[in-house]
Image (cartoon, grey):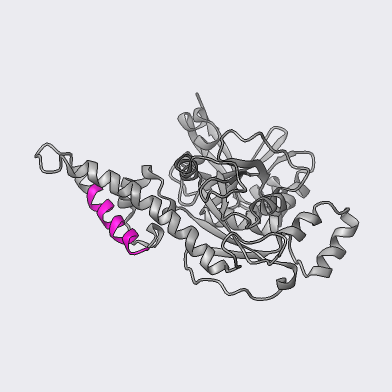
Amino acid sequence: MRLGIIGLPKSGKTTVFDAIVGPHKESHTPPHAAVQNIAVVRVPDERLNLLRNIFPEKKTTPATLELLELHGIFPSPWEVRTDAASSIALLREMDEIIEVVRVFKDDTVPHPKGSVNHERDLKDIDQELILNDLLLVDKRIEKLEKPITHSRTKQSDKEELDVLRQCKDALEKSKEIIDVNLTPEQKRLIRGFCLLTEKPRIVVENVGEDLLGKTVKSPPSNTREVLSFCAKLEQEMWYLAETEREGFQKEWGIVEPASDRLLKACWSTLDLVSFYTIEGEEMRVWPLPKGQTALDAAGKIHTDIARGFIKAEVINYIDLTDLGSIKEAKTHGKLHLVGKDYIVRDGDIITFRFHV
C-alpha cells in the first residue's frame, strides 16, 4: 500500500515525512522526479507484541506501508520544477492521500499566499484534485460519446458513460466522488481511472508549538480523518534517547507519537483487516481488504497456496492470547477449519492447507 503526502509549498511536508519516518528507518532513492522522499514504514501493531509473548522464538514481520512525499502538483520557486501532469499521474497510483496544511506561524518561513489560513489552503488543495478529476472524466466522456449512437456500442460503454456523467455533474458542483452515492458495480466501472477524489484521504494540520493541545477549527468532513500535531517537535523527538523521550512527551502533552497515530489512521481508513501467519521461524502480518475470503488471503501470500487451497485453520488472536497457546485453543474448541469462502476477520491467525 502506498501513501502520497501532498500540500502547498512551505506547509511542512518534508518535516511531516521526517516526523513519521524518523532518522533510523530505511529510505530509498526517489524513482520519479515528482518524489521528494520515499520510505517504507512499519505499521504499529499491539497485537503483534502480544503474540510475541506467546511465540518469543519467532521472527516477527509487521505490515508495512510505502510513504512518498510528492511535489510538483502545486509548483513554487522553492521546488524543483516538475511536470504537473506527471505528478498528478503518480498521485493517482497512490492508495491513500495525506494532505498537509499549514497552521503554524513562522515569520522566517513566509507563507506563499502571504497569510496562514489552513481552511483556505485545504480548499485550494481539494479544488486542484477536483479539477484534475474533472479533466480526466471530461476527456473520457468525449471519447465515449462519439460512437455511442451506433447499435454496436458495447453495453458496458453505455453503463460507464452513465456513471461518468454522474461523476461529472458532482465534480462541476465541487463535490468529491467519495461523497457520491455510487453502487459497488458503478465503482467497479470507474475503478481504472483512479480518481483522486475517490481515494481515502487524511488531513494533517501542521500546528505550531503554541497550538499544541488546543482545538483547531477544521472544515467539516464525514469522509476524512483530521490529525493535528507539531511536525517540528515530533521530528525532534526521534533524536532523543529513550530515557529522555517520555519526559519530552509529558512536557508537550504528547500522549502518542504522531507517527503511530498517523499510520494507524491510514491503515484504518484504507479499510483493511490484518491477518497473521505463523510458519517456520516467522510470525507475519498481512493486510487484506475488508470482506475478502480465505482464498483471497491465500493468494496474498502466494498464488500456489490459492491454486492448491484445501482448507484453512483459523483462530482469532483474542482467543489465542486469552488461552496462551495453540494447544489450549484446540482443547477449548477455538481452532476452526474453514473453506475458501470464509470471510477473514481482523486479527485472524490462519494456517493454510494446500496441495500443488
Q: Height in image: 176 above or below 88?
A: below
Q: Is residue 169 magenta?
A: yes
Find residue 103 and report its horizontal and vertical position in percent: 64, 67
Residue at the extreme right: 243
Determine the residue positioned at 62% across, 35% down: 30
Magenta stretch prevailing secondary structure: helix
Determine the residue positioned at 19% across, 46% down: 158
Q: Nearer the viewer, residue 290 or 343?
A: 290
Find residue 355 and report its horizontal and vertical position in percent: 51, 26
Find residue 31 and report its horizontal and vertical position in percent: 59, 33
Residue at the extreme left: 151
Q: Is residue 6 magenta?
A: no
Q: Nearer the viewer, residue 154 or 219?
A: 219
Q: Which residues are magenta?
A: 160-174
Q: Height in image: 235 above or below 94?
A: below
Q: Nearer the viewer, residue 55 or 243?
A: 243
Instruction: Specify the quadrant of the image occupied by residue 268.
Output: bottom right
Left or right placement of residue 224 versus residue 133 in this view:
right
Find residue 87 and report its horizontal and vertical position in percent: 50, 42
Determine the residue positioned at 68% across, 76% down: 214
Determine the residue positioned at 25% across, 54% down: 165
Q: Quadrant of the N terminus?
A: top right
